[in-house]
Amino acid sequence: MKSETLRSLLIDKELGELAPEAVELLDAYLATVPDARCQADIVARTVHTTRQTVRRFPELIATPSATNAASHIEVIRHWFAPSLAYAAALIAVAGIAAWLGFHAGASRQSVDTKVTVTRAPDHRYEGLWAQYQVAYDSRRGAYVVAQRQ
């Protein structure tokens, strides 16, 4: 077993964070490897000394303060506010480009496309002053009303 892995397992065991099955396996390993047992004793003494020191001097424990929270908020504002501004600008540019592309494609007439106007059945309106003709315009894809003179 690697020494780093052994140390992390020993620390987890001393702090009570290992499952009972893992503790049994670790104890069996320590019983068979004398060097590992020596390391286990060192880790146990270190954890015990740390606990005693923290109990005797509780001010050594780092407590979250309002200034730490405020500094974290400032870091978030410093890094994410410009990112959001860049994202908003990118979305605006993409939207304008899409709008311009749509209108350029919609107004462009292809040279290869033949425009055919199919006459619909003759539906004339003969009013007092003008006559109207309905025809199909393939460019627009719709029926149009044309004035006949």
Image (tube, rainbow, N blue to C red):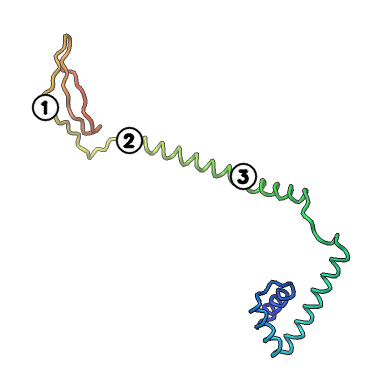
On the image, numbered disc 2 is attached to which residue? Answer: 106
Distance, label 1 to label 3, CA atoms, is 63 Å
Residue bearing mark 3: 82
The alpha-carbon separation of the residues under discs 2 and 1 comes to: 29 Å
Q: Using the image as rendered, state which of residue 63 and residue 113 is in the foreground.
A: 63
Q: Residues within 10 Å of mark 2 (few under 14, many from 20)?
A: few
SS type, badge 2: helix
Residue type at the position of mark 3: Pro
First reached walking from the N terminus: tag 2 or tag 1:
2
Report the number of numbered marks.
Answer: 3
Does label 1 or label 3 sit earlier along the sequence? 3
Residue at 74%, 89% (x, y): give it.
34
Residue 5, label in figure: none
Tell me whether the residue at label 1 lies in contact with that at label 3, contact meaning CB atoms closer than 8 angstroms: no
Q: Residue at x 22, y 38 (%)?
A: 113
Label 2 or label 1, whichever lies nearer to me, is 1
Q: Amino acid at mark 2?
A: Ala
SS of the residue at dot 3? helix
Query: Circle 1 is placed at which residue position?
Result: 121
Q: Is residue 105 left or right of residue 72?
A: left
In-image side of 7 versus 100 (left or right): right
